[in-house]
Amino acid sequence: MTLGHYGMAYEHISVMPFGATKADVARFNPIARVPILLLDDGEGLCDSAAILDHLDEVAGPERALVPSHGKARRRVLALLAIALGSNEKLVTALYERHFRPREIWHQPWIEACEGQVRDGYLWLEEQFTGPWFTGGEMTQADLTTAVFWSFGMAKRPGLFAKLNCPKLRALSERLEATPAFKAIQPEPEMLSKQLGGGPNSSAGATTAGAGRSA
Ligand SMILES: N[C@@H](CCC(=O)N[C@@H](CS)C(=O)NCC(=O)O)C(=O)O
């Protein structure tokens, strides 16, 4: 979404970091995790924080979605830490459902993780002043939170429908209407097919990106 926002050309390659395609991901990330951004010269950047930092540098200080220094930068990074952490806890709970047979799902662990998801989003909701998180200009905190809110709505609609976060919901809807978001439609479930999993599977496909202009 950030590549799209900056208008940087890129090729989006969907690849699962599990099962048959895990080795493909491990060629670029030793711990076989996505996202990965491959630059034109073959350099690979792993983890969204490193990728976003690079994109900001290419975009330049005037356009960068994370302010370059000072209190404004710390504020955006603080918001991002909670958005990223909340989504990681959501993914952790999704994996419990995917990778353990239903009869040995550890419900207290799922509930603890989803409690952290809820606490994270409720905190973010409180922080949102509008029209954007930090006031008058959109930052990476808005974009990342909207991405994760959409992801959560797709993967755990029951959990997210119960969250009392009207501002985050509206933020997400506003950004989903932009070309950068529209260019990447949510993908159908792939994990269960690739792993031969059952109907309980609910996590989505993940992606590795290939940057062209970045
Ligand atoms: N902190 C990482 C988290 C990335 C992440 O959660 N990736 C998952 C997506 S399904 C993954 O690759 N999972 C495979 C694994 O953790 O082994 C980031 O923001 O890039």
Image (cartoon, grey):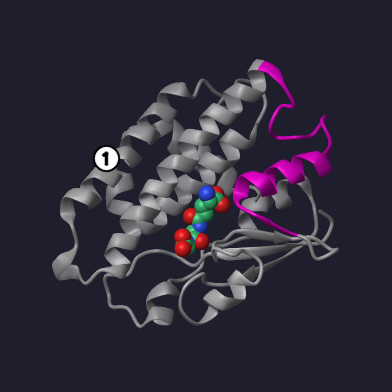
Q: Secondary structure at mark 1?
A: helix
Is residue 131 in view?
no
Residue at 43% x, 48% y is 88
Q: With respect to residue 111, does 96 lie above or below?
A: below
Quadrant of the rendered image containing residue 207: bottom right
Q: Is residue 22 left or right of residue 60?
A: left
Q: Residues within 10 Å of mark 1 (few under 14, many from 20)?
A: some
Name the residue at 45% across, 74% down. Answer: 190
Q: Which residues are magenta?
A: 44-70
Residue 146 is situated, as x and y percent measured from the top left of the image, at 52, 43
Q: Which residue is mark 1?
A: 115
**Horizontal and vertical percent position of residue 134:** 59, 22
Give the residue type that dot 1 points to.
Gly
**Residue 50: horizontal and vertical position, in percent?**
67, 46
- The answer to which image quadrant residue 34 occupies is bottom right
What residue occupies the far top of the structure in this picture? 71
Residue 57 appears in the figure: yes
Magenta-span inclusion, residue 39: no
State the image quarter where residue 212 is shown: bottom right
Q: Nearer the viewer, residue 177 or 46?
A: 46
In-image side of 101 versus 214 (left or right): left
The single residue placed furthest to the left in the displayed view is: 103
